[in-house]
Image: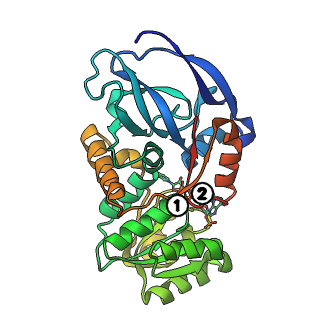
Amino acid sequence: MTETMKAQALVVPLPGDASVLRVHEREVPPPGAGQVRVQVAAAGVNFIDTYQRSGVYPVATPFVLGMEGAGTVESVGEGVSEVSPGDRVAWAMQLGSAASVAVLPAQALVPVPESVELDVAAAAMLQAMTAHFLVHDTYLCDEGTVALVHAAAGGVGQLLVQLLKAKGSTVVATAGSADKLQIARSRGADHVIGYHEHDPESLASAVREAAGRGVDVVYDGVGQSTFDASLASLRPRGLMVLFGAASGPVPPVDPQRLNVGGSLYLTRPTLGHYIADRDQLLRRSSAVFELIGSGRLEIAIDSRRPLSEARAAYEALEGRTTTGKVLLVP
Ligand code: NDP
């Protein structure tokens, strides 16, 4: 296939809030060497998109938004052996995913088994692979582990709770409303705490009281508003995993705070380093698809919207009204 294709794409013309987003029609070229052209079935909405759209993570404008998706291979470029036309594939960490057609590196594509729907695969790529590395690699969670999960009714949060419970760990979950706490409980959380009812000191006390001790590991994707309480919730030599900043970036930290807290550890992990080569990407994505296909991991899909409703999709994510994955369906 050597012709260009017409496609719809979600474009960021200039940095800004969700109101800057525009849907443009454009010509997509045939795939070059090592590339694949994909008909996109669904693209995921993620917090990283908001950091890129607003300029917190600088990207030269204009650019097509979206870092994950799933779809069907339409054509392959020279030298591509990883996939063939007609294959069902998914990908993560590829800018330009929010479009009806995308040209992607073959190395970034993973096969989607028949047991997993394409929209579920798109929903799983960033959030579920993230929850997977956090529970299996950043900290080796097992039945003796007591973990604190913030924003536990969110996309990553619900997945963390499920994977921790699958390991037999004890989960203390926080969220911002009674309805969200109910969702965290339904995913298996042992203890739930509304962090909107606490200041950092009383939140840490509530966590310690619920857990019966300081926790072994904190999974904090909220950032600025929870960071202090997270450190104060840890046992001596516990691990603070700061994996995001939904409430804003955490100010610089004095290392002495880790000493005072009890020889604590602090890490700021990101998915890219846990799928750093093709072997890791294939192993982690197939592990996640296996869990989903066998019914042991449920992907909560909050909503599916056309590209033309992308502004509302991002406003919902940033406005804390979603509970699970928001998908754009081109
Ligand atoms: P969520 O579905 O968890 O949405 C974010 C949630 O954070 C909200 O629903 C809200 O829950 C809570 N929150 C607290 N304060 C705020 C605030 N001021 N503004 C917005 N939300 C707030 O999102 P995701 O699951 O997609 O992502 C969660 C975090 O994980 C993000 O920080 C993201 O950047 C990070 N992430 C990191 C990755 C990595 O590789 N390190 C990969 C993927 C995601 P509530 O109302 O209960 O407080």
3D distance between C-alphas at marks 1 and 2:
6 Å
Marks 1 and 2: CB-CB under 8 Å? yes
Q: Is mark 1 within 8 Å of ligand 1?
A: yes
Q: Position of residue 255 (x, y in %)?
A: 46, 65
Q: Position of residue 53 (x, y in %)?
A: 63, 39
Give SS at disc 2: loop
Q: Which residue is mark 2?
A: 246
Callout 2, which amino acid? Ala
Tell me, for residue 221, which label it has, or none: 1
Q: Is residue 202 above or below residue 105?
A: below
Q: Is residue 284 above or below residue 306?
A: below
Is residue 118 rendered to the left or right of residue 60?
left
Disc nearer the start of the sequence (1/2): 1
The residue that appears at 32% across and 58% down in the rendered structure is 291
Viewer-proximal residue among 284 and 52: 284
Q: Residues within 10 Å of mark 1 (few under 14, many from 20)?
A: many
Q: Position of residue 87 (x, y in %)?
A: 34, 31
Q: Residues within 10 Å of mark 2 (few under 14, many from 20)?
A: many
